[in-house]
Image (cartoon, coloured by chain):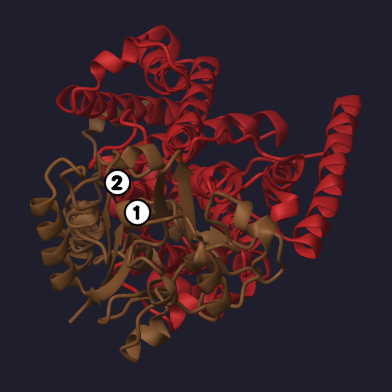
Amino acid sequence: MKIKLTFWKLVFFFIMASAVYATYVRFAKGLGPSTNLSDQFPWGIWIGFDVLCGVMLAAGGFTLTAAVHILNIKRLQPIVRPTILTAFLGYLLVCVALMFDLGKPYNIWHPLIMRNPHSVMFEVAYCVMLYTAVLSLEFSPIVLEHFNLHKPLKVVRALLVPLVIGGVILSTLHQSSLGTLYLIMPEKLHPFWYTPLLPVFFFLSAIAVGLAMTIFESSMSSKHFGQHLELPIIQELGRVLLVVLAVYGILRFEDLLHRGVLTLLFRPSYETYLFWLELVLALILPLILLTQKRIRTTAGGLYVIAVLVVLGFITNRLNVSITGLESSAGVRYIPKWTELAITAAIIAAGFALFGLAAKYLPIFSAGEHRPTLEEPETAAPAGVLSYDGD
Amino acid sequence: MSKALLYDATLCIDCKQCEGACAEKNKLRYDDAVAAEDKQSEHKFTVVLAKGDKYMRRLCMNCAEPACASVCPVAALRKTPAGPVIYEASRCMGCRYCMVACPFGVPKYEWNKLVPRVQKCTMCSDWVEAGEPTACAAICPTGATKFGERDELIAEAQQRLRENPGKYVNHIYGLNEVGGTSVLLLSSVPFEEFGYRTDLTRDPLPLFTYRVLSRIPDFIPLGGMVLGGVWWITHRREEVAEAEGGHEPTVFYPRHDDRRTK
């Protein structure tokens, strides 16, 4: 255990050190020397992975808050906080990634006063801003509780329901708008991925990934933070995941059928291989596994399914943002090491910050004597936070 | 009325004076090395391509309903009533969505600068605004590039097609492409040979995103009401159950489901 942790620490410091140098290259030399982006291919993995996937992976936040606070499914309560934490960290890291990708990051506030409501990017900018604000408020009780600040806690608690409703609306808009971004390029995006339904697909898959990420986190937390695994809860999530994936799969198939793209599926090409990779990882394998009750009800099975779904939809987002645009651009894009270093550092920072928050803040167990945001009756069993990472 | 450019490739003699005049107007370097470059870039807004004795210009099409202007979150790119699509660098935050969205791949980026700008032909907007022709049209010795009212140029292009059967490809490029452009092209060889896509939609591209965006103002209050309603129902049930004698709070799922979680 000790050796393993040291190994991961070494990896972490290596990633961070290379990211520091990459940051220097990015801001001292500019986007050209620090990326493989070009006039033909202006968006790379900082948009395709850090932003598109970052937002998608944060979807557990709105899915779970809606389930618990709007639908009033109380038994999901113990896992709401970790998902809010993930969503909050996710959005903060998306903002960090944007600072690297924007040509003039110091102008990031311009959409506040220079408006173009016809632009999807304008909608995206407002959703990122507003939802990050909502998430910080949804996250604040955890910090306020920790420092025993009762008055502000009361205020936030009073605002909870409107906040959650606002958060769900903003997330719906934001998740789908990342798909809408690509609707403007009917001639550029490959027909596997260009469909008027892109916003619907982005939204539905975000729900699926939100559920998968919640299962993934619960499993990881039970492994690394000595947290009791809420098996009945993740079984429940697994069942909902099956339904969401099935609906998504049927819609996706219908869409390919009606656009007459099905025949392309068996014509070997660069796009075909990556499309199949996406289908197998995101839909075919998880659906097969989820329909097996023997697998769907075990912690290990659910963990594998969650990882597959997450990887599958990461492939989907990269296909939409990179694979699908390469042929029309006439170039192949492979990220430069600097781009990879920044992306790796953002992922590593996500894990590290999650670990720190889990260690020092009441994420998994709401303290008994403190006033909590949620009703105390369903508070999580007071798990011992025994993360011995340092 | 909206101004436009008509470029008739059959009149072009590849003298490249339009390239030089464009560079001068936009204060860009122009020498033999730049003249030899055969693609648009952040330092070359227009280019005359040659294939044997056939020539073709490439420049920003200055679309009637430009995708670049529609996608720009801060309205740094704008279509002016006179015709040109202009760019205001001070508004730009460098998201490069314009580059991704442009169906002609026109906007270029100053990748190697620390304060980068999007660069493209802006149809000499200050001159056009003052009623003057663009630099490229003014200098063209053969009239291959002609400046004028868009409607009149279309009529003239149609007349040239009518009067010279067989001389031209029977198509005015830019008349309907992506809803029409302020640059119109005539050619004797297929436009694809010079990289112009002929499979472009006739719908203005901004429509594709606006169909979705225009629903947001309805979605927000509707979504809020539905979510608020569901919240009220699920919590009201619980209150009623409590008031009726301290039963277990009713939850969204039937009670037998609950047992699993205990």
* CB atoms of marks 1 and 2 within 8 Å: yes
Front-most of residues A125 and A241 = A125
Above/below status of B81 relative to A228:
below
Front-most of residues B68 and A15 = B68
Q: Position of residue A244 (x, y in %)?
A: 30, 31
Task: Please state if A260 lies on the left or on the right of A154 as rendered.
Answer: left
* Chain brown in the figure, letter: B
Give the residue displayed 84% in from the left and 35% down from the top.
Answer: A11
Residue A246 location, quadrant: top left
Give the residue displayed 32% in from the left and 60% down from the top.
Answer: B67
Give the residue displayed 69% in from the left and 53% down from the top.
Answer: A357
Chain ID for label 1?
A: A
Badge 2 marks a residue whose secondary structure is helix
Amino acid type at circle 2 is: Pro
Above/below status of A364 relative to A158:
above
Task: Please state if B139 lies on the left or on the right of A372 as rendered.
Answer: left
* Chain red in the figure, letter: A
- Residue labelled with disc 1: A177
Going from the N terminus, do you reach mark 1 or mark 2 first?
1
Front-most of residues A211 and B97 = B97
* Quadrant of the snapshot with the C terminus of chain A: top right
Give the residue displayed 58% in from the left and 62% down from the top.
Answer: B42
- Residue labelled with disc 2: A199
Task: Please state if A57 lies on the left or on the right of B145 as rendered.
Answer: right
